[in-house]
Amino acid sequence: MGKYHVTNYEQMSFDDFNQPSGLPIDRDNRWVVRADKIPWHDLEKQYALVFTSNRGPKPLPFRLVFGALMIQQLLELTDEETLEQIKENPYLQYFVGQSGYAYQRPFSSSTLSRARQRIGDDEVLAMVDRIEDLMVAEGVTSKIGKRH
């Protein structure tokens, strides 16, 4: 197994998100509130262990990949639909840690599928459940998805 690696990650603030001129963004949106409460850096440490490798391209940022998996689980979407939703929605783009709105997919559906396989479907679901429990503990009351 390769070296343990955590990126130089800094929590992005809502004020740093670059949206197109004239596109009003609500900082009280349920995805923004959740994104700001999730301990992305702590979770990334676990992700780094799963994706450590000395071969292939550098892994994508944890928040980008796991954020997409979380959106997929909460909204019960296919890989393709998950990426389309992210492409079309600035709130989801903020949630996955993009620096600003861009009308494009953040990565291919095969990347999402490979990430889910490497982490494991059960572990993805367990992580989403733990984060949702954390949201309740943090007082986040906005509901997302059919599971609520």
Image: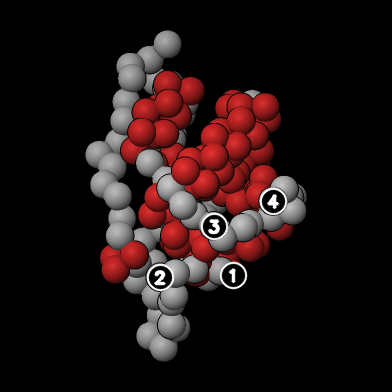
Q: Residue at x 59, y 70 (%)?
A: 88
Q: Residue at x 49, y 68 (%)?
A: 29
- Check whether the beta carbons of the residues at disc 1 and disc 3 lie within 8 A of each other: no
Q: What's the residue type where badge 3 is placed?
A: Thr
User: Label 3 to label 2, Cα distance in Å?
Assistant: 15 Å
User: Label 1 to label 4, Cα distance in Å?
Assistant: 24 Å
- Check whether the beta carbons of the residues at disc 2 and disc 4 lie within 8 A of each other: no
Q: Which residue is mark 2?
A: 27
The front one of 130 and 2 is: 130
50 in relation to 8, above or below = above
Q: What's the residue type where badge 1 is placed?
A: Glu
Q: Earlier in the sequence, mark 2 or mark 1?
A: 2
Q: Earlier in the sequence, mark 2 or mark 4?
A: 2
Q: Which mark is residue 148?
A: 4
Classify residue 3 by image quadrant.
top left
Number of the front mark, 2 or 1:
2
Q: Residue 82: x percent and y percent?
A: 66, 55
Q: Residue 106: x percent and y percent?
A: 52, 55
Identify the secondary structure beneath mark 1. helix
Q: Residue 35: x percent and y percent?
A: 44, 54
Identify the secondary structure beneath mark 4. loop
136 in relation to 30, above or below = above
Q: What's the residue type where badge 2 is placed?
A: Arg
Q: Which residue is mark 3?
A: 141
- Check whether the beta carbons of the residues at disc 4 and disc 3 lie within 8 A of each other: no
Identify the secondary structure beneath mark 3. loop
Quadrant where the N terminus sits is top left
Number of the front mark, 1 or 3:
3
Q: Earlier in the sequence, mark 1 or mark 3?
A: 1
Q: What's the residue type where badge 4 is placed?
A: His
